[in-house]
Image (cartoon, rainbow, N blue to C red):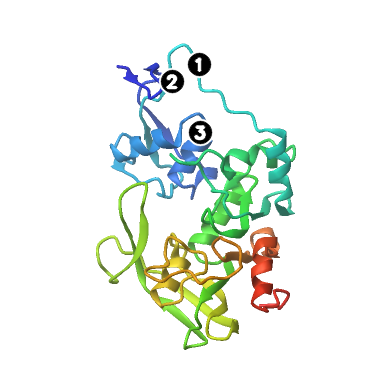
Amino acid sequence: MGETARDGHRQRLMSAVTHQTVSGDENGMRLDRWFRARYPELTHGRLQKMLRTGQVRVDGARAKASARLESGQDVRVPPLPVPVGRKSAKKPQLSAADREFVKSLVLYRDDGLIVINKPAGLAAQGGSRTGRHLDGMLDGLTFKAPERPRLVHRLDRDTSGAMALARNRLTANALATAFRARRVTKVYWALVSGVPDIAAGTVDLALIKAGRAGDQRMRVAEAGSPGAQRARTHYEVVDRAGRAVSWLRLEPETGRTHQLRVHLEAIGHPILGDTKYRGSEESPAMDIAPRLHLHACRLQLPDDVSNGLEIEAPLPDDLLGSWRYFGFDPSFDV
């Protein structure tokens, strides 16, 4: 009952099928995070394959990686492979440089929460084309706590800014519940092409995934069509540089993948530096940072999480230069 691994090693099954019960402190966890917490040596790719083929079941039914678990549910765990000749894959050691790097990102820390200022270019989690990612560095943020922090929400690889990490399961559940109930306020800044005719408004356009695996993107869809998810973004023009560029304050009501990028492109004002969603428009020839000009500048939590913490993530130096290039004052409180 073995299978051939990509590296050419034969693999054996480390166990038979088991059934695990979701505990009370795991209530609200995503299924993929539940697996990562219980089976840290299980790779992302292997888990995705088990989910696609229906080997993983929750209360007897197929489930997606994003499914939220409830205490008392039964999770079917299929046999997990381990290369023959090794007890398990060793977890790579975090380098001293990466340990110092990830600590330098911390904006705030208490007993249950860490908030970092994630840089652009750093993915939240690994994938088939991602070697270095935030999830692989979380051991550098334990600060002598008995467990590593947990990701409770994500920013795109190309987006910088405030990102919350839970230091224990209780806080993770509270944050996950708050995000699902839309009780967390997230404010972004963006530089976009052109100036919206309406200075403040709401983009209410459903989104759906399109494209093949590895090159998947989101697109606008008819509300109610199969697979479409409702998405709402509130925006306000903070400043403008003539009719060429404007600075927008964005507050997403929902949290869909690439929501802000797709919504702004859909209304004709794509984010500067967005090579994925600029449509047919050419990027303006400007002496600015060659990156997505989108930054999560503020995060406000509900009162029952870290006493309603409100924290700001300052613009990184490259974006600060772009703001100043257009004569915008990033110290302006929005």
What crowding class fits label 3: few (fewer than 14 Cα within 10 Å), some (14-19), or many (20 or more)? few
Q: Earlier in the sequence, mark 3 or mark 1?
A: 3
Q: Are marks 2 and 1 in contact (CB under 8 Å)?
A: yes
**Marks 3 & 1, CB-CB < 8 Å contact:** no
Q: Which mark is residue 38?
A: 3
Q: Earlier in the sequence, mark 3 or mark 2?
A: 3
Farthest residue in the left direction?
226
Residue 297 vs 240, above or below: the answer is: above
Residue at image point 52% right, 69% down: 272
Q: Is residue 313 left or right of residue 192?
A: right
Say if residue 316 shows up in the picture. no
Name the residue that disc number 1 marks: 87
Q: CA distance from mark 3 to mark 1?
A: 17 Å
Q: Position of residue 72 (x, y in %)?
A: 43, 42
Residue nearest the observer in this picture, 329 or 228: 329
The x, y position of residue 188, in whole percent, is: 58, 69
For discs 3 and 1, the disc positioned in front in the rendered view: 1
Q: Residue 79: x percent and y percent?
A: 37, 24
Instruction: Tell me the quarter of the picture where residue 144 sits.
Output: top right
Quarter of the view holding residue 12: top left
Eyeballing the image, is 82 above or below 59?
above
**Residue that protrudes farthest toward the top in the picture:** 85
Q: What's under tag 1, amino acid-wise?
A: Lys
Q: Residues within 10 Å of mark 2 (few under 14, many from 20)?
A: many
Where disc 3 sits, the SS reads helix
Tell me the CA gap for discs 2 and 1: 7 Å
Residue in front for this viewpoint, 23 or 158:
158
Residue corresponding to mark 2: 82
Dot 1: what SS?
A: loop
Q: Amino acid at mark 3?
A: Arg
